[in-house]
Amino acid sequence: MFDTLSDRLEGVFKKLRGQGRITERNIEDALREVRLALLEADVNIRVVRDFVDHVKQKALGQEVLRSLTPEQHFIKFVADELTRAMGGQARELDLKVKPPVKIMVVGLQGSGKTTSLAKLARWLKATRKRHPIIASTDVYRPAAMEQLRVLGRQVDVPVVESREDEDPVEIATRALARAEAGGHDAVLIDTAGRLQIDDELMEELERLKAALNPHHIIFVADAMTGQEAANVAAGFHERLKLSGVILTKLDSDARGGAALSVSAVTGAPILFAGLGEKLDAFEIFYPDRLTSRVLGMGDVLTLIEKAQTTYDQAKAKELERKFKKNEFTITDFADQLKAIRKMGSLGDLLGMIPGLKKIAGAADSEEARAEFKRIQAIIDSMTRQERENHLILNGRRRARIAAGSGTSVQDVNRFLKQFDQTRKVMKKITRMGAGKAMMRGMGFGR
């Protein structure tokens, strides 16, 4: 995520290392590089100009703290400005209205609009305990309505039946009536898209807005389209007054132009980020957390939140006890591997840990995946007794496990060494104040 921008900014910071103090000369050189980095990231030119001006004012207008180096100061100024450009702080979707909350989802064709609507419905149901109903008013795109029916079944949310020969406004008003009659406290309306903005599309969306009087009109933008996403969003905002944005494909965006431009250009906050094709790959957008990841500082809070949704609290407490007593077994280790894989891409997870951004990319490589498979095969080839007490694994048993897993004795020995190291490290972590605090956040020690 934003790898290109991240690498360029890191190069800028390196050049400031070793400088005794911040001067107008070294700041001008650094800002020139920042400007180029942002332009290469396809950030809107006005946003780039404001970004650079604000960083310069902070760098030259603020008394430098003795405890910070010029590099550290500059990183802080850039971090502050990155966060500000992306909206400053996470914005909660306001649901404090008389039900049903009415949400229109708009955007260009191919932006991921229909899938994002299904993800939002699932999120409302899973995290906000809402009972949504969804409907498609896209009477133009072939199979658009069928796509929403399929997605509705997958997220277990009812879909209002509609036909391609109906008027979009009639479908939307029927969906609202069914929501009110059926006790649904949220109604989400999928709308038609085009390959580009045109008056016919906007007039239809304006008719839908007038008929529904929606609480929220949410624009779906493809992060891979860079600043063009911001330009299109601005066109929609001018006619419809957007209340928020969903950025799709954010996990695949190496540049960052859309995330850094759309909010600044439209004034509409980025509410959610789509981070993959799976219907649960959908998160609240946190500008400060994304900034931290871009600058290689990790994102421990999101990591903890992911862990909280994966770990069973009772199991987590038992796991902490095992770590403390040095009773952590290979069976437990196998369970944790499965839990990690449920949390998502290993590369993404490593990217959330401070200092591990550089190796995060390699974590999802073929070599890394092959290593996971080898470890799983080795564990599967052990007896239950061996998994519960690895100390009984003598030479004969190790040779049998290697043969059964299609690996070598050296592979088995390497895994057992890694397992021992894991036990030692986790035992220390559970006894450390800071480490324990993080473990508590993940559900341990409650």
Image: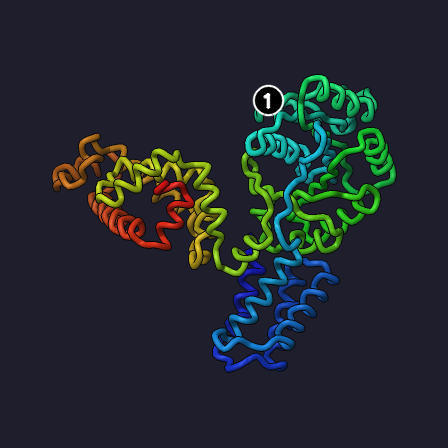
Residue 51 against residue 130 in the figure, above or below = below
Q: Position of residue 269 (x, y in %)?
A: 69, 48
Q: Position of residue 311 (x, y in %)?
A: 40, 36
* Residue corresponding to mark 1: 153
Residue 313, located in which quarter of the rendered image? top left
Q: Residue at x 63, y 77 (%)?
A: 60
Residue 412 against residue 185 in the figure, above or below = below
Q: Residue at x 53, y 69 (%)?
A: 11
In this image, 365 relative to 131: left or right? left
Give the secondary structure at mark 1: helix
Q: Position of residue 48 (x, y in %)?
A: 70, 64
324, 152: nearer the viewer: 324
Q: Residue at x 65, y 62 (%)?
A: 40
310, 130: nearer the viewer: 130
Residue 326, located in which quarter of the rendered image? top left
In this image, 194 relative to 113: left or right? right
In this image, 136 relative to 356: left or right? right
Q: Position of residue 13 (x, y in %)?
A: 53, 70
